[in-house]
Amino acid sequence: MEKVSREIVVKSAFGLHLRPVASLVRKLSSHDAQATVGYRGRETDARNMLGLLALGAGRGTRVTVSAHGRDAQAALQAIEAVLTGPE
């Protein structure tokens, strides 16, 4: 089972707010992987909308993203695309 992890700088305009979080959860639903997002010593499941919002990661912050499972690499790329996108 593959496990991948990396730090990502949040570039979406308002950080982890409702729109990118909802997009992230939707994109992850098609991947066979468990993923987490961590910020300032806290970590949450990347499919947990309230947990992601509670992290309070704003634009320009650095989060740690980890994924493991059959589609771990694809899940990590999907998360990165949302966090670095224009929303």
Image (tube, helix red, strand yellow):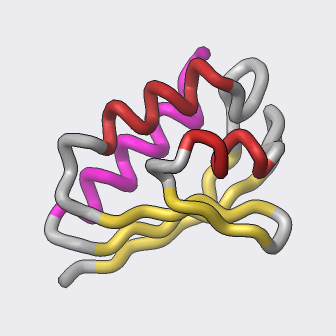
**23 left or right of 50 in image:** left
**71 left or right of 73 in image:** left
Number of dots carrying numbers: 0
Q: Could you say which is closer to the camera, residue 47 or residue 11?
A: 47
* Rendered residue at 34%/31% (across/down): 26
**76 left or right of 45 in image:** left
Q: Is residue 24 above or below residue 44?
A: above
Residue 59 point in image, percent of width and height? 80, 33
Q: In this view, does 16 lie above or below 79?
A: above
* Rendered residue at 44%/26% (across/down): 23
Residue at the bottom extreme, as displayed: 1
Residue at the front extreme, as displayed: 50
* Rendered residue at 60%/16% (across/down): 87
The question of residue 66 being in magenta is answered with no
Q: Is residue 4 above or below residue 16?
A: below
Magenta span: chief secondary structure:
helix
**72 left or right of 82 in image:** left
Q: In this view, does 17 lie above or below 50?
A: above
Q: Tell me the quarter of the picture where residue 11 sits.
A: top right
Residue 4 point in image, percent of width and height? 38, 73
Q: Could you say which is closer to the camera, residue 40 or residue 10?
A: 40
* Rendered residue at 79%/44% (across/down): 57
For the N terminus, which image quadrant? bottom left
Q: Tell me the quarter of the picture where residue 17 sits.
A: top right
Residue 55 point in image, percent of width and height? 77, 51
What is the span of residues highlighted in magenta in the rendered image?
Answer: 71-87
Q: Tell me the quarter of the picture where residue 62 sits.
A: bottom right
The question of residue 79 being in magenta is answered with yes
